Image: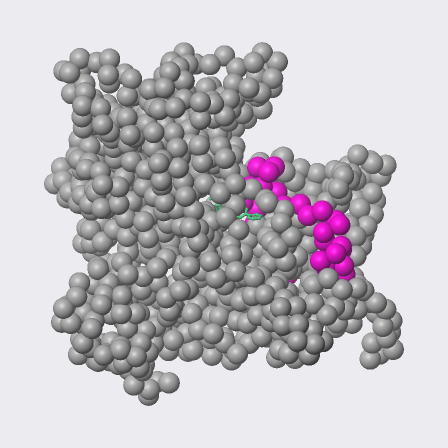
Amino acid sequence: LEQSPLANQQTDVASLQASIAYHMNASLFRTQHNLEKVAVYQALAHSMADKLLLDWNRTQQRYRKDNPKRVYYLSMEFLLGRALDNAMLALHMKTAYQEAVQGLGFRLEDLLEQERDPALGNGGLGRLAACYMDAAAALDLPMWGYGLRYQYGLFRQSVQQGFQVEAPDDWLMRHHPWEFPRDIKYDVQFYGYVATKMNDKGESRLFWESDHKIRAVAYDVPVPGKDGFCGNIRLWASQPPHHGGFDLDAFNQGNYDQSIASLKDAFLLTSVLYPNDNHQAGKELRLKQEYFFVSASVQDVVHRFKRYRCPWSEFPNKVAFQLNDTHPTLAIPELQRILVDVEGLAWDDAWDIVTRTFAFTNHTVLPEALEKWPIYVMEKVLPRHMQIIYDLNLFFLQKVEEKFPGDRDLLNRVSIIEEASPQQVRMAFLAVVGSHSVNGVAALHSELVVKELFNDFSLYYGKDKFINITNGISPRRWLYQANPGLRDLITHTLGSEDWVADLPQLQKLAPFADNLEFQQQWMAIKYANKVRLTQWIRDDCGLTVDPRALFDIQVKRMHEYKRQFLNILGVIHRYRVLLQMSPEARRRVPPRVVIFGGKAAPGYAIAKLVIKLINSVADVVNNDPVIDDHLKVVYLPDYNVSLAEKIVPASDISQHISTAGTEASGTSNMKFVINGGLILGTVDGANIEIRDEIGEDNIFLFGTLADQVADIRHAQKYHGVLLDANLQSVLDAIQAGVFGDASIFNPLIDTLTYGGDFYLISEDFDAYIKRQNDVDALFLQKAAWAAKSIRCTAGMGFFSSDRSIGQYASRIWKVDKTALGNGS
Ligand code: 26M
C-alpha cells in the first residue's frame, strides 16, 4: 500500500490535486468537466482517507504484533460529526489541501460544508464517546470503539408553524468515504431454546439454539490521532445470514413474500437509532439492537484474544471493556455464556474473568432513564441470558445475605430482578454486579451515584468500587478546529501549539487577562465568530440580528430537566420589562439575542410544546417595533455537531440551568467556556468543577442546591406551589393570548401548577432573573467582561478529554500509552 499511487505520500499541492483528480475519475466515475461542489468534496474526502488508511494500517499492525492490553469502548452511540476537517488538521494537511482546491477553483470552506454529519448519537453520551475516541487516538492508547452502523441516524429537524417536524436522516444515501467495509462477519441469534448437551470432554452443558440468526458485518471508521497514529471504531451492520435468510420451503412453493420475510427483519435491525435521550422506551427492537451489537463485539474480541493462544486467565490482562451506560450491559451475561457454555470454563472461574474485565459508566440518575427490561421479553428474545441473569442474581444475593444476614428488605432493594408486575431486569444493577469499577461523570453526579442510586451496593462492595471521572472534551475539535481565530491567538501568545496536547498550559493566558491590547484582540475574535453565526442565522432563519448584541445561547436536547422552559419564561419577563421602560431606560439595557437549538424526542409532547412556545415568543418579540433590536429570539433548527462548531465559539453567555442534581455532567458547558464564553448556570454537574477551576468570579451561578431539592419537593406536596409573582404575570400573559392561541400551552403551564413544579422553575425564577441582570450589567463593562472571558479559557485545562482518558487508563483499565508510541 505504501507504494500505491492511491496513497501517494507526497503532500505538495500538485500531488494533492492529482489525487483529487484520480478519485474524481476512479472513485466517482466522473470527469473533470462537470465539477459540482459535492463531487469535489467527495474526491477530496477520498484523497484524505487514503492517507488516513496508511496510518490506520500501520497502527493496527503494530498492535497486532505487540499485543498490548486493549480497551474496548462499548457504546450504542458515536456522535462523530464531520470527518474531513478533523482529518486534515490531525494530519497537518489543511493548508496544502486549501491551496490544492483553490487551484481547482473552489473554496475549502464551501467544500467542507458539503459533508453530511454522521449523527449516530442522541446527545451528550454519544458525543462523549466521540471525544474519548479522539483522545485515545491522540494519546496512542490501544482503544477501539464498538457500536452500530445505523442506516438512519438521529432524525433531522425542521420547524413548521413553530412546531418540530421530524424527517429521516438518510446519511448513507450519498456515498460515505469515511468507513471501510470489512470481510468480518459473525452470526447473532435470537429466540430459540436452551438444551442440555454433552461437550467434547463428555461434560453435560447447556446450549442455546435457535434458527433465528442475523449476521453482523463490520465497518471500520478510522479515528485520526497524532503523529501518524490512527484509532478505530468498528460499527456493525445487520444482514441476513448466508443462505439462512430465505425461507426455502416457502421459496420452493413459490411463496416469495413469505420466503423473504426474515430478510427484511435482518435489514431492519440496525436501520434506525432510537431518538430518546435520557428516557428508556422499552421497545423489543431496541433490546435486539443492544444484544446484536454486544454479541458481535464480544465474539470479535474473543476471536482476537484466542489468536495469541493465551490461557483464559490472561483475558483480563489483555481486555478491558468499558460500558457506556447500561445499553451494552448484556455483554456481561454474553461473555459469561461464551466462557461457560462454549469454552467450557467453570462458572466461578468464568465469573472472575468477567468481573475483572468489565467497568461501567453511569450517565444519569433520572429514574425514567434507567433501563429495565420485562422478564417476559428477555426470556423470549434471550432465553439463555435470562437463565444466566437468574443464576448471577442468586449467587449475588447469597453473598449479600452472608454479609448482612436477615435483611430481607435489602435483598429486595439490590436484587437484579425487580419484583413488580411485570417483573423486570434492572440493567444498572446487572452492570454494577458484573463490573469491577463503576464511575459517574462529574463530582456531584458521582456522589449522587454512590449515595442514592447505588447506596446499598456501596455498602456491600465498599466505596472503592465507585469512583468519579469527570467528563472532558476534545480540545482539537472544540477549540483548535472550531475556533481558528482563537487558536492562532493562543498559539501566538504561548509561542507554540504544545497547549493542544497539554491543555493546562492554557493557564499561561491568565497574565494577559487585564492587558487591554490583548483584550481587544481576544474580543475581536469573539466578534468575528458572532458575525459568522449572524450570517448563518440569516441564511437559516431569515432573521437579521446585530452581532454587537449580547449573544445568549442554550443549545442541547430539549428536556424538562434542562429547563429551556425557564429560559423562555425569562425571555417573556424581559420582554415585558422592556415594554414598560422609557426609551432612554431601554437603551441602557444591552441588546440581547437569545438563541435556542435542540431536538425533542418525537414522543416527548411537553418538550415539543416548549419548542412551539419559543417560536411563538420569537414571532411576537422579533416583530414588535417598540422592542426593535433590544431583544431577538432565535430558534436554530436541526442542531447537530457541525452547527455546534459554529455556535459554540460565538457565545457571550451560554445557559446550563438544569434543576440541581439532574444534569450528570454536561459537556457543552465545557465547550463554551474553553472558547471564552461565560456561563449562566445552576450549581449542577460539571458547572461546579468549572467554577472551581476558573474561579467563582468568572461564572454566573444561581438557584437551589442539589441537597435542597428533595425538601422543596416535599414541601410542595403538602403546601402546594406558591408561584413567584413575576412568573405569575408571565403565565398570565401567555394565557391572555399575547403569544397566540393560549390553549395549546395549557399542558405546559400545568407542569408548574398541577401536582407540583417538579423541576423547581418557580422556586428558581427570581434568582435566575437577578443573575440575568448581573449579566447585563457586566456586559456594559467591556474590559471587565473581556478579562473574565480570558480567565475562562485560561482555567479550562482540566477539561481536556485527554485528561479524562488518562484517568480511565490508569484508574480503571490499567493500561498505559503503548511504550512504542508515535507510530514508530
Ligand atoms: C435508552 C434506552 C432506549 C433508547 C435510548 C436510550 C438512551 C440513549 C441515550 C438513554 C440515554 C441516552 O443518553 C443519555 C445522555 O446523553 N446522558 C448525558 O451524558 C453526558 C455524558 O456523560 C452528560 O454530560 C449529560 O449530563 C448526560 O445527560
Compared with 309, 692 (above or below) is: above
Q: Is residue 154 left or right of residue 373?
A: left
**Image position of 734 (left or right of 376):** left
x then y, percent, for residue 280: 59, 44
Residue 369: within the magenta? yes
Please tell me in which quadrant of the rendered image residue 789 appears: top left
Image-based side of 91 in relation to 426, left or right? left
**Image: magenta residue range:** 357-386
User: Residue, x 56% and y 62% (percent of image)?
Assistant: 268
Residue 792 position, x and y percent, is 30, 39
Q: How is the image coloured?
A: one colour
User: Can residue 594 be seen here?
Assistant: yes
| Residue closest to the far bottom | 3
753 or 433: nearer the eye? 753
Q: Which residue lies at the image location 85% right of the left edge and 72% below the top edge?
A: 197
Q: Quadrant of residue 111?
A: bottom left
Based on the picture, tell me whether residue 106 belongs to the magenta stretch: no
Q: Is residue 336 visible?
A: no
Residue at 39 percent across and 33 percent down: it is: 612
Name above or below for residue 428 compared with residue 385.
above
Q: Nearer the viewer, residue 9 or 744?
A: 744
Q: Residue 459's x, y, as percent? A: 70, 39
Specify the quadrant that holds the N terminus. bottom left
